[in-house]
Amino acid sequence: MSDSPLLNRATHIIDQVSSEKPADYVLRGELGADKELSPSEKRDISKAVFTYFRWLSWLDKSAATPSRLASALDLQRKFEADPAYFKPEALADRAVPEWVKDEIDLTPAYLRHLQSEPALWIRVQQEFAAALPRSLGNLAPSPSPLVPEKHRATTLRYTGQTDLFRTSEFHQGVFEIQDLASQLVSYAANPQPGQTWWDTCAGEGGKTLHLSALMENKGLIWASDRNTGRIATLRKRAGRAQAFNYRAVTWNGGPFLPTKTKFDGILIDAPCSGVGTWQRNPHARWTTTPTDVSELAEIQLQLLNHAAPALKPGGRLVYAVCTLTKSETTKIADAFTAAHPDYIPDPVFANAAAATPGPCQVHLWPHELNANGMFIAAWKRKG
Ligand SMILES: C[S@@+](CC[C@H](N)C(=O)[O-])C[C@H]1O[C@@H](n2cnc3c(N)ncnc32)[C@H](O)[C@@H]1O
């Protein structure tokens, strides 16, 4: 980006960002209601702000913001022209905070991916899967073998420049903007039409809507969250997507459950440090702390302990977090398994064709999927 009014606007935004006011929050506030800027100008400003935070540790602390921003944009151009120019050791030292080295086995491929622009994924409703690529264009299915064959045409990467939120197809509920890793969580849950599921941390309903689509709107999903604002958004999104087989309730994660219902399946898409989203939201690299990780790990184990008894014998429990720290992934899953002999680790992805069952804990690495990072574990309750 070389347009100076846009660079000035990006600089103005960067100067407002702090640990209390994250970059994505300031961007939403600054650009959301701005009627003067075109969608492509807004996209350029957002990109410049995120580029700044992606290269933050390379920038001269004593320089003024405009010159630091220019250096960041220059580093991004250099990186895109030749990623190998940046040595893995330098990336390990600068692309992520030091504490992460105790929590993630960093690889050169992962670190390089963190410094690139993120991909945009959508999930199209099955009945529009043939028509949407013709009307929207620039859509390609994921090559990941983890996407079930019959849903391959609904899990698509968008490479065009249109602001998808402004398209009539989006407003008609034809598709949702949903990262590939998030879509894989619902494929891992593998709910069946007519079953009863509990989406314990439903938030704004990204996975509730996908579970509903996989259940063909048949059966029931209890969708809970402790945040009533998010539940309200979930209801709006469900209306747009014509998802009807859900009941939205509040649950604060405590021992008092929202219902006495016993479920065929429970999905715990738990609050987490979000390290898996650091490519998309690089400012979070510099605000997330080891204390966040340990506090969230306690909440995650508590959510599992409190929700699991609501599972029917033979039911499926799925734990997912969009992070990759050991404390919130394998350590939580192992601790739950050790404390609950009635819950038997179960393969995360069903693959009837495979000779041996797949793993019961899966890391979805961003550089392998070209998407967010995610961890998924699954159990079956003894029948
Ligand atoms: C990863 S987000 C869920 C995203 C959502 N499932 C989706 O696909 O759009 C985690 C959610 O957990 C909720 N949450 C945080 N702490 C909680 C708790 N103690 N009990 C229940 N929900 C909680 C947050 O409000 C947030 O919406």
Image: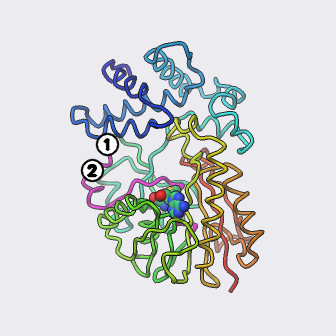
User: At x 54% / y 74%, what residue is drawn?
Assistant: 256
Kindly identify which numbered label has been placed on residue 25: none
| Residue 238, picture quadrant | bottom left
Q: Quadrant of the N terminus?
A: top left
Local SS, label 2: loop
| Of 268 and 90, the residue lying toward us | 268
C-alpha separation, residue under disc 2 versus residue under disc 1: 8 Å
Label 2 sits on residue: 167
Q: Viewed as shown, does residue 138 lie left or right of 323?
A: left
Give how far across and how far down residue 79 sits, in percent. Answer: 56, 26
Q: Residue furthest left?
A: 36
Label 1 sits on residue: 162
Q: Is residue 35 visible?
A: yes
Q: Viewed as shown, does residue 324 lie left or right of 71?
A: right
- Kind of residue at badge 2: Thr
Q: Viewed as shown, does residue 5 lie left or right of 316?
A: left
Say whether disc 2 or disc 1 marks the residue closer to the N-terminus. Answer: 1
- Kind of residue at badge 1: Thr
User: At x 68% / y 86%, what residue is drawn?
Assistant: 383
Local SS, label 1: loop
Residue 9, placed above or below residue 373: above
For mark 1, does the 10 Å Cα neighbourhood hold few (<14), some (14 to 19), or many (20 or more) residues?
some
Bounds of the magenta segment: 162-189
Q: Is residue 183 visible?
A: no
Residue 87, placed above or below residue 370: above
For mark 2, does the 10 Å Cα neighbourhood hold few (<14), some (14 to 19), or many (20 or more) residues?
few
Proximity of marks 2 and 1: CB atoms separated by less than 8 Å:
yes
Give how far across and how far down residue 293 sits, in percent. Answer: 64, 48
